[in-house]
Amino acid sequence: MRRNRTAMAMVSGLALLVAACGSDGGDSAAEATTTEATTATTAEAAETTEAAETTEAATDTTMVEETTTTEYVAPARGDADLVIWADPTTQVPVVEPLAAQFAEEEGLNVSVLGVPGDKIRDQLAKAGPAGEGPDIIIGAHDWLGELVANGAVIPIDLGADVDNYADVAIQGFSYDGKLYGLPFAVENVALIRNVDLVPESPATWEDLEATALQLAADGTVEIPLALQENGNGDPYHNYPLFTGYGGYVFGTNPDGSYNPDDLGIDSPGALAAAEAFARWSEEGLVSKDISFDIMKESFMSGKAPFAITGPWSVGDFTDAGVNFVVEPIPSVNGNTPKVFVGVQGFMISSFSEAQDAAKTFLLDYINSEELQLAMYEAGNRPPAMTSAFEKIASDPIPYGFGLSAVNGQPMPAIPAMASVWDSWTSAYELVFTGTDPDTAFTEAAAAIREKIAGG
Amino acid sequence: MNDDHVVAPGRGTRVPRPGRVSLTTALVVKLGVLVVLNGLVLAGIQRMLANDEVAMAVFSGLALLVIDGVYLSERRFVPGKYLVPGTIFLVIFALYPVLYTVYISTTNYGTGNNLDRATAIAQLEAQSVASSDGAIRYELQILAQGDVDGPLAFLLTDPNGNRFLGTDAGLEPLDPSQIIADGRRETIAGYVALNTGEAQDRVDEVTSIAVPTDQGEVVNDGFRAAFAKLQRLQYDSATNTMRDVVDGTEYTVESGYFVAPDGTRLLPGWRANVGLDNYQRLISTSSVRGEFLRVFVWTLVFSIMSVVLSFALGMFLALVFNNPKMRAQKLYRSLIIIPYALPSFMTALVWKGMLNTQFGIVNRMLGVSIPWLDGQWMPYVSILLVNTWLGYPYMFLICTGALQSIPGDLNEAAIVDGASGVARFRRVTFPLLLIAVAPLLVASFAFNFNNFNLIYLLTEGKPSVLGSNAGRTDILISFTYKLAFGGGRGADYGYAATISFIIFMIVAGISAFSFRFTRRLEEIRR
């Protein structure tokens, strides 16, 4: 492992000077693993340092080292006029036939390249300016803050068709009053209920609380509510409950966009929510020790009657043969809870030389109910187009998630959101470990405001 | 002339010696290697120049000249032959990253500032193009007069279904009867409809068409729509300002952004030199000032204790297994290596799961609920425990190696002199061991000082401290990460480089000091 290499590099000569080398090696390598988009030069330098060290300790190559040193490179454009980057497994097969149709009818070369979702942003920033990037990418709306700040995407005008899409999806892809993406799917959490343990849908969150705690007290279940907190606190999964008491993260402008100057982490509603979380933690409804794995395992094995999670978990629940339903979280404290909604969509690269052709493709070919339904078939996420969503009512799991999204808010994509997560997570953690909820959330809000101002 | 030098010693001696042959072979090999090296580096330089990496190209060229000079001259620079390659690698792999880090630390490079200035201005202007308020959005079909290479025109349809022919001369209303079908498309007599591919081939001509109307100039938006455009932002190179033509706001340049009088920044900005701003920011941020000392002390404690504990355990085991009477030595030794052979990325996460208070296997097996990763002191204990577990096999390995190199007669002599086991260890084995492993301990210290993986995977720096950005178990490097990537605007490479450089100075200082100490140890032996 690294220790060995650094050590070996150090012994290998030039004692004092190499001490500097070794420590810097550690330094720049840490940078390379944590900051994906460092310029090529630093990344290369870090890699070569490692390579040099590797030769001195050649026997010791671990798998993890390899993943950090092998840099992903997106497939080349070739001679295509229009290039689309999409997820290789779920999206390429859906987009490819449309691209082929477009290519034939419109007389240009279109290629759909598989690029893993977590690589697209980074690769766009690297390949785009060099003219090797895509014209269209498929991605999540919460990339927008970064993509717009980096000038990597261009606005799209859907004209009157904008009304065909769910409000939350359009709001998600809007930034500074402009639309930057054509949405096709939404993704969010909902309440998952084990029907064998709880046959009736609870009318309110307070009913759910009573039922869950009763089942745990009976010994029927081990965990009353599988809500992941990951050892600290999970603001994303807690958000619907947080909003039930009137908490919010950022206030909204009249046009639905978020206002970074109106932070709601220490609003009266938020403080009330924090107190509720302290109470739930006290009585055992929520536990900071529940990780994603524990959440999943406990629901799969029937050790938990309720879970709050998203479509990414339900495949395992189905495979485990759990008899469950997906439904919106019932009213919390008398209010409708709002989940954070992620929106997926098509965006056009600002580095593209075929932006007009790309717009034509999106408006004439992607902007259709058929595409939305095909994407839903492949990715199992509720469609963003209202008419397409109505057509999937017969498929209760995605439809349940979609219903939960109706009252949702798009996850803020504004840069200020980056300042929020850390302190917000800590605030929950402090509440769960006994700090006064008011103090924890007030201090967190102060820290977040300082970070936003300093950025 | 070099050839003369090489062959000269041979000429004087009449008797052929085998050494002469190998000398020539060596020369051929040397020249061959140099030729290959020159070829590779020159090719590299060519590519660097093509990519505008002038500084790197100049450095490579100079390095090549030095190498050629040193190795082609026979007699002079003999020490250089040994030192030059190492020095060049040192410059490339150690000095260059440090200097580059310093350079980045004086810029505002990060999310929102990663374009160059000209691109940023172009993006700002292009992004500000929008349909002017209330402008009609037309359906568009691009036409070409005569054949596909003929002059271009727009066939426009407004939302009410009225048709127009748009050219640089203006709008010309069309009667529905004039529209004729052209495959899937529509056209008018004398024109052909272009498909997207044909339009894309002439995209520059298409985008240069601006149809004057009473709403403004109608331009294409994609190849299927058109609207009267309005470019809100216009850059004035004379005053170096950006002007919003709608509300008249003047944006002036300020550290890599266009900034309005009220402080609003336009995004994207560009990568600009900000001097020592990042250093100033580091010093002036109250949360950093307050936390730095606490984090620094824990970083020191963590790295020193990690080395001491894992060294103590590793050395103890090495001493035990060094006993020749022990059976199945190799088996035990192999088993001890296991924590070291598993990737620490994985084991740290596994430990995190095992130490979970409510569901972790450790507490479940013991039937207790010790908050391993919570509270005032337990997280420190847990981290040191896990890091000792991760680190002792390495210490075991180097101690085993070093022990075997200690001459047995020294110990025998001590036995003859009547020294006890403890005294033999204290006076003979341990000092000799330390001479061999001390540099490695310093290295291990430097590694642990920046042991981001363990902290981030095991505790993420938690538990949190009320009102502070740094958690209880954050070390400098994980604190850096939180400051540089968890703050204001996503990734902030300039700021990260600033803190990295400061950490580098600390580690380099401590290492330099320690190596001086190590050298003193070596003098003991003499």
Image (cartoon, rainbow, N blue to C red):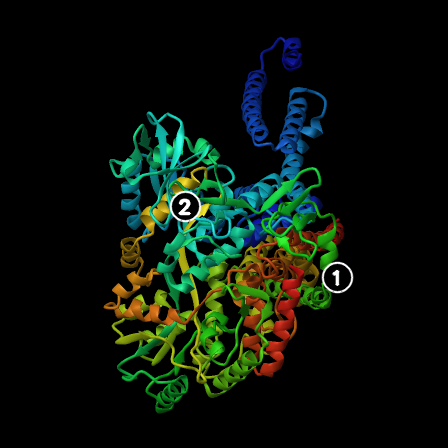
Crowding around mark 2 (Cα neighbors within 10 Å: few <14, some 14 to 19, many 20+) is: many
Query: Residue at 37% of width from left, 25% of height from top?
Result: B149
Amino acid of disc 2: Ile
| In the rendered image, the vertical position of residue A370 relative to residue B20, given as above or below | below
| In the rendered image, the vertical position of residue B82 relative to residue B7, given as above or below | below
What residue is disc 1 on?
B284
Describe residue A279's horizontal placement relative to residue B156 as left or right. Answer: right
Q: CA distance from mark 1 to mark 2?
A: 43 Å
Task: Please provide percent x and percent y for residue B239.
Answer: 71, 41
Mark 1 or mark 2: which is in front? 2
Residues indicated by labels 1 and 2 sit on the same polypeptide chain: no
* Residue toward you, A245 or A397: A245
Q: Quadrant of residue B72?
A: top right
Query: Residue at 56% of width from left, 59% of height from top?
Result: A415
Task: Please provide percent x and percent y for residue B490.
Answer: 57, 57
Say what secondary structure mark 2 lies in: strand
Numbered label attached to residue A182: none
Q: Is residue A288 visible?
A: no
| In the rendered image, the vertical position of residue A39 relative to residue B352, given as above or below | above
Query: Residue at 55% of width from left, 69% of height from top?
Result: A250
Amino acid of disc 1: Ser
Given the image, what chain letter belongs to the residue carrying mark 1? B
Given the image, what chain letter belongs to the residue carrying mark 2? A
What residue is disc 2 on?
A136
* Residue toward you, A384 or B294: A384
* Residue toward you, A197 or B456: A197
Say what secondary structure mark 1 lies in: helix
